[in-house]
Each structure stands twice: as structure tokens, then as C-alpha cells.
Image (cartoon, helix red, strand yellow):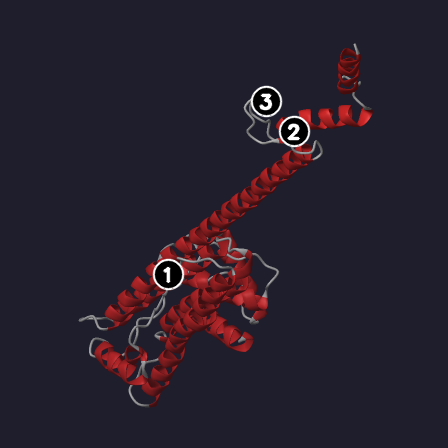
Amino acid sequence: MTRDTNKGTLHDFFDEPETVEVVQAGRRLGRLPRARAGGSGDGPRRPASPPSGLVPLARLAGLVAVVIVTVVAFVFWIGACQGAGKHAEYAGYLSKVGTLALSSSKLGTEFANTLLARGLKTGGLKTSLQGYAEQEQQAYDQAQQIRAPGPLRQAHQRLLDAFELRAKGLAGLSEALALPSKPGADSSRLVGALTAQARLLTTSDVVWDQLYRLAATEQLKAQRVIGLVVPESRFIANTDRVGARSFALLLQRLHGVSTRSAPAPLLKAGESGAAVGAWQLQLNRWLRKAQPTQAQLAITRRFDPATEAATKTLQTAASITPDGIVGPATRRALRRELARSG
């Protein structure tokens, strides 16, 4: 009886309800397996998700990067288009100049060959020189119509100067041959006149090389236009051919045929030909200097009303009868007026 009571008492002691500390400890122990990585009973862990505020920020950064790349590509594309357009503009200009430059160089070669031609006569030489002068004047007129890119406009003016010097020199040679060509002092005077006019031709080459071609090349470099070359143009390849000695020999050859040059023909309304074209060219030289407000004549090689009116204007300025007919007195008057106006 006593033993049972003791057993019961012991049983009751060991079956005493769990305390709060034990319950809490059990709960903590029950969570331990979940805290272990790779536990068998809990399945794969989810990766930790980024904070919610970083996702929109990353998307915005990506969008900004795309926009920047697009803008940069667009800027480079615009620059490439502008560069191609600039290159095409300069190439077109130089192509037009190159055509005139080549034609003028060929004319210079033809001029030199004419001076050395056998059986040359004064009248034929004058006619050839007048024709050459007309061609250079036409080259000048065509060059005026070429639109040069902005940075090349100043250099382009020197190009015009070169063509004008060539036209003026050739016309001056033709006019000089109309001077008396007797042996002695008159012959020396004629050689001096021819040499002075030929000097305009050699000067034109200097103007082309130093004032046009060099300046235009520097502008191409400054504008970063690559792959283009400014054309060369040399009218006098050998300066000895237009020196005093060469002209003295030329006159000797001419005098072997005729001791006097053929008189210049009278020009009046209705006339046409190379002589009229040369006269129109000379009148334009005078008009540019003495009558800058008056319109230039078209080189039509026809003695039209405009040519007659300009001739009368010259005759009036020179105080000779304004009959509109080009004779010896009118030609001398033009030479005086040109010498006076420089």
C-alpha cells in the first residue's frame, strides 16, 4: 500500500506538466532544421529577391544608355552626311576649274608652237593671237559663273586674275604687232613692246601657282577636305620663248616675208570675224577701267549695235570723231586710253 503510494507519487512527480521555459526551448529546437542550409525536409531555398526599389532604377539606367547610344550614333551620322556633302561641293568646284585649267594649258602650248611655226606671216600671227585672246576671255567669263565654296572665294578671285592676264597679254601681243616693224630703233621698240605684253602671260602663271593654287590648297587642309587636288595651269612652259631674244628672232623671220605688218582692217557695223572679236575684247578692257558702270560687251565676233555704241563712247572720250568706225586713229586712241588707265 505504501509502495503503491510511493510509486504513484514518483509517477506524479515525473508526469509533472511542462514549464514555460521547456516549451519555449522545444519550440526553438523545432526551428533548428529550417535554419540549416540544404535540410532534407524543407525543399530548395528561394534566392533572395533584390530590394523592390532597384528594379525600376536598373531599367531607367538601361533606357538612358540606349538613348545616349542612339544620340551619339545620330550625331556621327549627321557629321558623316555633312562631310560627304562638303566633299562633293569642293570636288564639283575643282572639277569645273580643272576643265578650264587644262584648256588654258593646251592653249599655251598651241601659242608656243605658233611662234615657232615655219612660214609664219604677220597677218596670220595677229589673227591667231586674237583668237587665243578670245578663248582666254571666254575662260574668264566661264570662271566668273563658277560658284566657289565660301572659304575658296577669295582664292577664286586670283583665278580670275590669271585668266584676265592671259587674255590681256595675248590681245596686247596682237596689238603690238600693228606697230611699225622697221629695222633699227623701231625694231627694238617692237621687241620691247612684245616682251612687255608676254610678261603678262608669265605673270599669270605666278598668280595661278602662288596666289590661287597655294591658297586654295591651304583652305582644303583647313576645312579637312582630303583626297582633292587643286588643278595646275601653266600657260608659258618655257619662258625663253617669250624673251627679248626670241621675239627678235621672230621679227627677223616675219621680216623675211614682209618688212611691214599688214594694216589692220577697218571695222564697222555689219562686219564679223576674229578681228571684230579682238576689238570687242579690247573695248571690254577699256570699259572695265574707264566706264565701270557700262555693261560689258558679249564677244559675238559681230560688229553689232552694242559694239558700235561702245566704239563711239571711246571715240568721244578720246576727242576724235565719234563715227563708230574702227580705223587707225581709233586704234591708237584705244592704246592711249588703256595706257592712261593702267
Q: Which of marks 2 and 3 is nearer the N terminus?
A: 2
Task: Identify whether 194 is placed above or below 226.
Answer: below
- x and y percent of residue 74 in the render? 56, 42
Task: Identify whether 137 is placed above or below 44.
Answer: below
Q: Which amino acid does label 1 sit on?
A: Ala
Q: Is mark 3 on a helix, strand or loop?
A: loop
The Cα atoms of the two marked residues, 1 and 2, are separated by 99 Å
Nearer the observer, disc 1 or disc 3? 3
Look at the image and tell me in which quarter the N terminus lies: top right
Task: Using the rendered image of the protein, determine whether residue 179 is visible from the camera's viewpoint.
Answer: no
Residue underneath mark 3: 42
Nearer the observer, disc 2 or disc 3? 2
In the orientation shown, which residue stands out farthest toward the right? 20
- In which quarter of the view is residue 262 placed? bottom left
Residue underneath mark 1: 101
- x and y percent of residue 144 in the render? 49, 56
Q: What element carries label 1?
A: helix
Q: Which amino acid does label 3 sit on?
A: Asp
Residue underneath mark 2: 32
Residue at left 73%, top 24%? 27
Q: Earlier in the sequence, mark 1 or mark 3?
A: 3
Residue at left 45%, top 49%? 88
Viewer-side residue, 30 vs 42: 30
The answer to whether 81 appears left or right of 105 in the picture is right
- In which quarter of the view is residue 197 placed? bottom left
